[in-house]
Amino acid sequence: METAPDRAQAQADGTGRGTRNGTAAAHPAPSPLSLGWLLAALGCLVPLVVVWASGRTASWGDTARLYEPLRGLVTEALRAGRLPLWNPYEGTGVPLFAYLVHGVLHPVSLVTSRLGPSAGIDAMMAAHLSLGAAGTWALARRLSVSAAGAVAAAFAFGLSGYALSMTSNLVYLAGAGTAPWVVLAVRAAGGGGAGSIAAGALAVAAQVFTGEPQWLSVAAALGMALAAEASGRRGLLFGGASLLLGAALGAVQLVPAWAVLPTTIRGAFGIQPEERVHWALAPIRIVEMVLPGFFQGFPGDAVAPVYERLGRPQTGYSFFINYRFPFVPSVFMGAVPLALALAGLRRCRAARVLGVASLVLLWLALGHHAGAEQLLRPLPIWGSFRYAEKLVGPLSLCVALLAGMGVEVLSERKGGTSGWLVLCGGLLCGAIAVGLGSGLGEDALSSAGAGPVAGIVRWRLAVGGYHAATALVALGALVVAGSGVAAVRDRLGSLLAALVFATSLAAAPFAMRALPRDTVDRRPLAFLAAGPDPARICVPLESAPVPGVGAPGEGDPGMATDSAMGVVPYQVPSRIDQVDTYGASVPAWLNVAYQALGFDVAARRRYGMTHVVVRDLHGQAEAFRVLPALEGGTVVHRPEGKGFSVWAVPHRAWASFAVNVVATTTPAESYLALQAAGRDWTRTVVEGSIGGTSAGRVLEVERATEHARVLAEADGDALLVVNDALADGWSAFIDGTPVRMIRADLLVRAVPFPGGRHVLTMEYRAPGLAAGAWTSLAAAVVTLSLLGWALLRKRPARGSPIPRPDAGQPSGSG
């Protein structure tokens, strides 16, 4: 007979399972999948292992372009015991730590920087995928799902199209890998207890450190909903406490990010109208949730004709912003997990909460197509998020948890009728796929768009239909057999988990991409860094689109050429500068300055642009843009067979004394004065008063990431211009004495310099970092106190006997 303590322990251990009214009952026997978390974590690594075994890398997209080149700066700083606060190699300098997206303080970042710095970004991707799978397993067990169901849930999420395709965007993969732990911890904190609240805070802080606030918002909301379902108002109170404490723990990251946000184009100008409608989930793309590869085929094609014809918004803004791919390469969830999720909806109240959350997340993912963007845009914080398609990630998590519950429902009940319906549905799907695929010519098979789009759509539907039909037939057969065959019935949960794994794994090539490890030039144009002054390049034209790139495992000529040319930020590991920057947080002053110059490449010589990298030109429009930038320059490098050349051009030095100064009093005046100066980089526009413009000489320069030093001498009071961005947090000293800095040319630093020989030093401290660090420290003290209190309460009283494992059992053999 089961006692109340037994039921409570079963619920705490996650070994109970919910019934329709949300109560818990104990499993009749221990599951052979008690190490399911390990099975789930390792199983979701299979696609990556296959890639690595072939000698390739799974790093592509923004992971390869944005995060991997900058990872060296992060690792170098962390191993030296400091934070990577500033990146001097983009756009005359941009904040690094405060931009959130690099996840500097996330546990995976900290561990890999110490234990596996040479493993590169692949190790981080593997860690995040494993964490996401293990977290989904643990969350499912917390919701009293059976061990087999929890493994199925972990496979459904960890091998979902979203999770695997985010190997293309590390920050969102990190968000996906940490979010299940946040939901789990907040839901557990809702039950009360010092230890649970502390654990919830730690999970929330880890999510903060991923750098993806939208995942944090959704995971927190889902955790609070489940906490309320389990514990009512008490759940909301204690779950909210863990969220607040976790946010305080993450203040060291949040406060600098909030401080720097107003200086970015997103903070200064808001989200532009064209960005509000792009990359929302197109309604027709919902079919891809069961038909892998429908929108993009295999990732990597230079064009995505199905997306361009059926998914990209056909608005006037498309002329200005020409995204040729969906944001999420794959939204596949699978016919089997979706069918299991429908079955799981009947299980308990928590299942119904997840069902409602799934509908809400689908609505949010549809964005302006369903009215979500129009309704929620005015909301604080949420209104600043872009690309609604990202919400497919949390939607996949909810569906995966419901699928785990569905495994348990089908294992408990005789599902013969349902099995026959699924089996017939699979056969019908297969017949339709055969009909769609028959009679298509070779042109229709081209995923690069050589054939008519209608033919490509038919082919994609046929390929996806074969996959869905096979999955449904297998699911139906298992359920039917489970209702009549004892051997299958006893193992039905494990067999369903294996089916989720197999069908999800078969769709993996449509979600992720393998590239040769030498595709990306890891140190492009490194010879330029050997000069005495900082080398600063401009690449006005990226590589021309290369059609038909994307068969899995093939190289990417476009990526190879871009990296070799030093397209931003591929050049960062070479420690050379770029006048441009890449990412969502472009500094507002950089954008304003370039607007004033009309985005004229030649005019950027005033910012110390030493070289221009030009690929072979295609047409007069490209020549009109590029040739003025080469005037007066000479070719210094033309690698054979690469299709580009490097030109050294006349320029203003990185540090120099201004002699032709235009003084202004307001930013508007500075804008007009810089616009008038144009390509005449001998004129310096300065906003504010100056002491003089005597001639001088720069004798030595020294430049690091958060520090710069200039030894110079001037004939009298002068103005020393340093062509690095002026940003909040920078301070200047002459011979150790603080000196004011003036904004020059709308972007860079100018310092009044007294006559004689002096040393100018400049140092950077991220705004808000000190306040954030003190807040995090105080929160850490509270968290440790809660953990200590929880541990003390669990210790037996002094002098009390310690219970033996065999307590209460007969001691003799009779």
Image (spheres, helix red, strand yellow):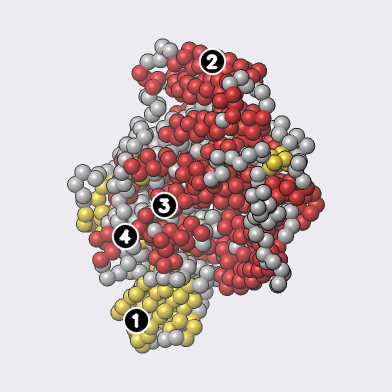
Mark 4 / mark 2, whichever is N-terminal: 2
Mark 3 / mark 2, whichever is N-terminal: 3
Mark 3 Cα shell of 10 Å, populated few (<14), some (14-19), many (≥20) = some
Query: Secondary structure under badge 3?
Result: helix
Asked whether residue 103 appears in the rendered view, the answer is yes
The x and y percentages for residue 411 are 63, 30
The x and y percentages for residue 130 are 49, 47
Mark 4 / mark 3, whichever is N-terminal: 3
Label 4 and label 2: CA atoms lie apart by 56 Å
Query: Secondary structure under badge 1?
Result: strand
Query: Secondary structure under badge 2?
Result: helix
User: What residue does disc 4 label?
Assistant: 574
Q: Residue at x 48, y 72 (%)?
A: 764
Mark 4 / mark 1, whichever is N-terminal: 4
Find residue 263 and report its image quarter. bottom right
Mark 2 Cα shell of 10 Å, populated few (<14), some (14-19), many (≥20) = some
Mark 1 / mark 2, whichever is N-terminal: 2
Q: Residue at x 50, y 43 (%)?
A: 39
* Kind of residue indicated by mark 3: Ala
Q: Nearer the viewer, residue 401 or 754?
A: 401
Question: Left or right of 357: which side holds 44?
Answer: left
Q: Nearer the viewer, residue 95 or 589?
A: 95
Q: Residue at x 55, y 33 (%)?
A: 494
User: What residue does disc 3 label?
Assistant: 123
